Amino acid sequence: MGAGLVIVGVTLLVVAAISRSLSGTPLTPAILVVVIGVLTGPLLLDEITAQPTSATVRTLAEATLAVVLFSDSSHVNLRELKREVSLPARLLGVGLPLTVAAGGLVAAVLFRAFSLSDAFILAVVLAPTDAGLGSAVVTDEALPPAVRQALNVESGLNDGICVPLLLILLATVAGAESHPIRVVAEQIGYGALFGIAAALLASGIVRYATRKNLIDRTWRQIVPLATTLIAYGAASAFGGSGFIGAFVAGALFGLLIEHEPAHTMDFTEITGLALDSVTFLVFGAVLLGPALKHVTWQVILYALLSLTFVRIVPVAIALVGTHARPATVAFMGWFGPRGLASIVFAVIVEDAHLQNSSTLTTTAYVTVGLSVVAHGLSAAPLVNRYTAWFNSEPERSRTY
């Protein structure tokens, strides 16, 4: 335990020390911490020895995802999104179901031991995207706002949408009676309800306390983190998706306090960044490293197809009929990195002890690991290339 904490601390120090040098380069902090995790885990040095199914690993991953979702969604411009709602709606309403369908069919072909349920469990685990692994894509203001917002919103909501699908599939494999419509309604409905309630409560407190000069600047920064806990905890307690709760709370909270003093979100963003780094370190050591011993050609091929064909083709189909240019379709199709949500889902599957859980989780972990590297290395160069193309278009005809 002591050695593991030292490794976590040293890793954070190393990344912090060179963080400015890493900015804008192909080498991202996520790549660095995953590599350190693999090196220090049971596969090599054996200094981080937590079990994949331990409560610590699952709690860390879920807490990180909730905080990151809240933080990211707080920067979504809801007024601007209202004018460009068609893109995220297409990605979620058309692209996501097609991604699950394509992923399930590819899994059924490659893994002959899989049942149809196994194949679609793997597809759902790897359907959610993680905008943070290509942060330049959602933070570079030179990119068309509609593209940035669409990818960010898609990343924030697709994991929450996939939660009930995963639970239904796991219940089906276990032979339990399930009511799909009820599960989906509760997950999304309670998630959104308690997200809205938490945001209204917290923003009201911030605005009132600021006007009355009751709140300290430092404690104001604690409010977003407290709001995340309320939204996630309340939604989960009532059978809803805590991840939808966190995302909805963040988006509404950001809208309601946009004219309040700056730096309100600083602490939550820094907390999310630290948790994200620790989670990917543990991922490399406890999940990815041991999984590498069980890699087969089917696992590698599925991972490659999951990040390309299974993602890009559904996005291209989802954008048919829009005025999106081929460069934009390719850009949005490629930037669907798999990260935190897939890690959380894979740990849930591992906890379920399915007959083919080893192959399922190995494939999921390898896909996430490949995504960390591929999307991390390509984010800055492709953002620069895409923005250069976009800015080269005449002003009068410039569209995404």
Image (cartoon, grey):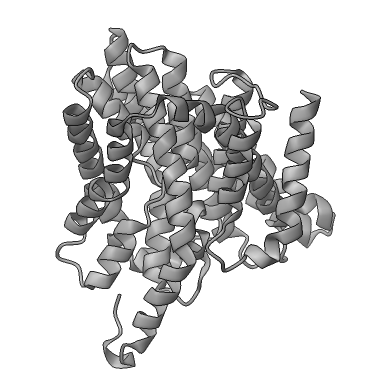
Q: Which image quadrant: the C terminus? A: bottom left
Residue 16 horizontal side relative to residue 283, left or right? right
Residue sitting at 74 percent across and 36 percent down?
7
**Is 61 left, or right, of 104 in this rendering?**
right
Res 390 → quadrant: bottom left
Expressed as whole percent of the image width and height from the top left, the position of residue 18 reads 72, 60
Q: Is residue 63 above or below residue 173?
A: below
Q: Position of residue 83 (x, y in %)?
A: 34, 68
Judging depth in this view, the residue of 306 and 68 nearest the camera is 306
**Is 350 positioned to the left or the right of 112 in the image?**
right
Q: Which residue lies most toward the front here?
A: 44
The number of discs equals 0
Q: Is residue 366 visible?
A: yes
Res 355 quadrant in image: top left
Quadrant occupied by the N terminus:
top right
Q: Nearer the viewer, residue 338 or 43?
A: 43
The percent position of residue 332, horizontal first and vertical second, equals: 32, 61
Indicate the position of residue 62 as horizontal and vertical percent values.
55, 32
Nearer to me, 353 or 253: 353
Seen in the picture, residue 326 relative to 91 is either above or below; the reply is below
Does residue 189 appear anywhere in the picture?
Answer: no
59 w.r.t. 17: above or below? above
Could you tell me which residue is drawn at 77 percent across and 43 percent down?
10
Q: Is residue 30 left or right of residue 294?
A: right
Above or below: residue 226 compared with residue 236: below
Residue at image position (68%, 56%) is 265
Q: Quadrant of residue 102?
A: top left
